[in-house]
Image: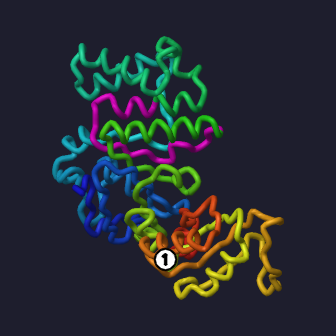
Amino acid sequence: MTAIVETLDLTRRYGTNLALDHLNLTIPEGAIFGFIGPNGAGKTTTMRILTTLLPPSAGEARVAGVSVTGDPRAVRRLVGFMPDFFGVYDNMKSWEYLDFFGRAYGVAAPRRQQMIGELLDLVDLGHKRDEPVMSLSRGMKQRLSLARTMMHDPRLLILDEPASGLDPRARIELRELLKELRALGKTIMISSHILTELAEMCTHIAIIERGRLLAAGEVQQILRSIRAHRIVEIRVVAGAARAEELLRSHPEVLELRREGERDGEDASPLDDASGPHLLLVDFAGDERAMGELLAALIASDVRVSHFAEQAGDLEDIFLHVTRGIV
């Protein structure tokens, strides 16, 4: 996959404080890229360098092959930046706000008017076209700010804590909007220290702590690297005793637990009358072996209503690779 962002030993110092420590980061084109870290980890500093708002102390950063220090004007046309603080101008209407930034980017008048209408509809603010920006709710302002980042049709959107302060409904709407933007061909870099905001939409992540990159890549790939085995969930509606016997004797089943079972608890034999039963299997096999295990259960007349690998989440990854240093 082609990289749209590449950094090489990117470093930034504030006096004696090392905010970025030789950061080597790659963002593939078309990804929703979660940039994760605690407050003060260096997320905003990285984003400001990529958007040419802050010069690096050392190292290099490129957007679509263009150096952020060598040709900052070209980079600004490639990038749309949404900072963590929404700044507006008093007494501007929604369409005027977008028009202002369209003019700043040199978008021709006919195209600018078309873009304003399309973007307001995209972020579901068409009905607020003539409303003063200051009268909008926080969630609407966030969506308007996102529309503003796209006025010049950039290839890369960089969003710094975009869901901060939003209510649950607004967060869901923002998440769905970002997925739609990815479907339109945009690459999205989004920072957060709230993992639940990113868990359901990111295709790739990078974890940063104290200016250092700790892990980066596809979410499931990273999860696989820190979790040696698969956890398979099996819900049995009939034949529970046979299922447990088969699983305990299987060479690739390392551990078998029942849902709610405590460590050291003596487990009584399973019976169908008290079911269905959810079994958690620590499984050492690959995808093919999982298929063979399911086939073996069915062949033993075990009725299975659910058989799936337990999905890991970003909290597992974050807790595994970070040390809590700010």
Q: Measuring from the top left, give residue 126's x and y in whole percent.
A: 47, 17
Please state which amino acid type lies under the numbered disc 1: Ile
Whether 187 is drawn above or below 284: the answer is: above
Q: Measuring from the top left, give residue 248's x and y in whole percent.
A: 64, 85
| Residue 78 sits in quarter | top left
Q: Which residue is mark 1?
A: 226
How many neighbours does mark 1 have within 10 angstroms: few (below 14), some (14-19), or many (20 or more)?
A: few
Horizontal side of residue 206 vs 114, given as left or right:
right
Quadrant the C terminus occupies:
bottom right
Question: Over which residues does the magenta segment extend?
Answer: 145-167
Whether 324 is drawn above or below 311: the answer is: below
Q: Measuring from the top left, give residue 215's x and y in whole percent.
A: 42, 70
| Residue 113 sits in quarter | top left
Quadrant the N terminus occupies:
bottom left
What's the residue at 49%, 72% (across, down)?
290
Between 61 and 271, the one lying in front of the other is 271
